[in-house]
Every structure is written in structure tokens, then in C-alpha cells.
Image (cartoon, helix red, strand yellow):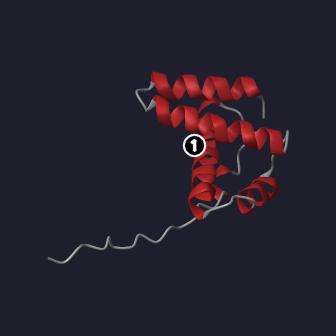
Amino acid sequence: MKLSWIDEFVSDWVLSGKSPTTANAYKKNLILLLKYCSDPQLIDIKKWLTDAQTKEVCRKRAQSARAFGSWCEKVGLEEFGFWKQIPVQKIEIKPQCTVAA
């Protein structure tokens, strides 16, 4: 995994009409992953996900890695071929409490 790949992923993401805000969030997560492990394999990513402070952070990290993996597959990079196996944290959505009159 190289920083130049991350930059190209972000460029392709934005050029395809997707959100620049999401692209930047993914980039930050992917740089954190790269700092955690310079050549991440599935087991490394799973460990990185378990280090997340909250379920929400874990989920966003996983989404970032999976989006990057999907892009790698599309451009012919085989280094992230395991991307579909990256687990995404389930988050229970609770109904919002309302104020009774």
C-alpha cells in the first residue's frame, strides 16, 4: 500500500462525482492504516479495526478500507484482493426519544 495509491483513489473518487468530504475522510483513515502497518493484510486490518475507540469509528475505518479495496480491484492492483472480507461493524439504530406534550 502506497500513499500515491491513496491520493489516486481520492482523485478518482471525486472525479467520479462522489463526495469530496467522504473522500477526505477515507484518506485520513487510510493514512492512519498506512501508519499502523505499511503493508496491511487482512489480519492487520482486523487488528486496526479492533483498536478503534467506538463502533462508529470502527465502521468508518472498515468502510474506508473496503472502498479502497474496491478501487484497487477496479484499477488492477492485487494487493488488496481480500477487501470483501473486511468486516463492517453493525450499529444498532435506536428510535429517537420524543417529548410528550
Rendered position, 86 above or below 23: below
Q: As rendered, which of 15 and 99 lies closer to the eye?
A: 99
Residue at image position (63%, 23%) is 8
47 relative position to 77: left or right: right
Please state if 60 lies on the left or on the right of 78 as rendered: left
* Residue occupying the point 25% across, 72% down: 98
Q: Residue furthest front?
A: 101
Q: Which residue is mark 1?
A: 67
Q: Residue at x 30, y 74 (%)?
A: 97
Q: Quadrant of the N terminus?
A: top right
The quarter in which the C terminus is drawn is bottom left
64 in relation to 50, above or below: above
Relative image position of residue 5 (x, y in whole percent):
70, 27
Asked if residue 92 is positioned above or below residue 63 in the image, the reply reads below
Q: Position of residue 48 (x, y in %)?
A: 76, 55
Between 27 and 43, which is closer to the camera in this rendering?
Answer: 27
Residue 28 falls in which quadrant of the image? top right
Q: Secondary structure at mark 1?
A: helix
80 or 10, nearer to the observer = 10
The three-letter code of the residue at mark 1 reads: Ala
